[in-house]
Image: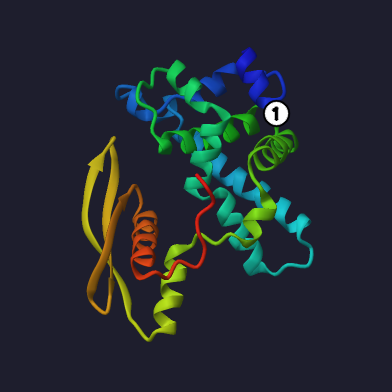
Amino acid sequence: MRSLSSLLGFIPANLHLYKLAFLHKSYTHGVQMSQNNERLEYLGDAILGTIVAEYLFKKYPNQNEGFLTKMRSKIVKRKSLNEIADQMGLDVFLIQNGVDNVSHSMLGNALEALVGAVYLDVGYQRTRRFVIYKIIKGYLNIKELETFDDNYKSQLLEWCQKHNRQVSYKVLSKFKFDNRDRFKVSVLIDNVDQASAEDFSKKSAEQLASKKALKKLGAMMVEEVAE
């Protein structure tokens, strides 16, 4: 309770919700979905997206929809959530709930589930404060995100258009890992294989493969922020 209160910035009323937020499905040994964090993750994803959208809308009154959409994507994308959850120390809570091998994807999922738990426990306004002050302002450099572009697929497409080249993607394989679908994808330029990568979503694997291809071509527009 002390650790959770320090993390949240308030004393939680429904401790069961938070225990559930850190209960990963792969460690529940076949019990019902209602007894793991998937439903809270679903809810938290929607709440988080709404709060971030509202925050950006008010912060940038003169920016267009395209800018706001890109900024929201940078904040709520899987990699960002994984890294934020790691910095928040959510692995400790997962381990306390029986997870002995915490993956980055588990961390991001747990963060979304935590937001869902906060919403059900204390309502929208206090969840909004938690997301803005404990997550966005606590772990993100918004000013840096304004100019940082890590959409490698978009960068590669722009490079190919500039050099009159054709880019395409091919799913090499789909398999199960950690009870989840995992994709291996290759990126081709003018039908020549340039790079391949794998991740838990096809979209993410395409991004990773695109990044490798950009580095191979010497066409990286921006370097990634130090990890």
Residue 118 on image: x %, y %: 63, 30
Residue drawn at (49%, 32%) of the image: 110
Secondary structure under badge 1? Answer: helix
Colour scheme of the rendered structure: rainbow
Number of numbered discs on residues: 1
Task: Pick out the residue farthest to the bottom.
Answer: 164
Q: Is residue 100 above or below residue 82?
A: above
Residue drawn at (72%, 37%) of the image: 133
45 vs 123, left or right, is left
Task: Pick out the residue farthest to the top.
Answer: 2
Task: Pick out the residue farthest to the front.
Answer: 218
| Pick the front one: 17 or 168 | 168
- Neighbor class of circle 1 (other Cα within 10 Å; few <14, some 14-19, many 20+) is some
4 vs 208, left or right, is right
Residue 58 on image: x %, y %: 78, 56
Q: Is residue 57 above or below residue 98?
A: below
| Pick the front one: 86 or 55 | 86
Residue drawn at (23%, 76%) of the image: 191
**Residue assigned mark 1:** 122
Q: Quadrant of the N terminus?
A: top right
Residue 41 on image: x %, y %: 50, 37
15 vs 79, left or right, is right
Residue 217 on image: x %, y %: 35, 70
Residue 73, located in which quarter of the rendered image?
bottom right
Residue drawn at (46%, 30%) of the image: 37
Identify which amino acid the numbered label 1 is placed on: Val
188 vs 221, left or right, is left
Residue 101, located in which quarter of the rendered image?
top left
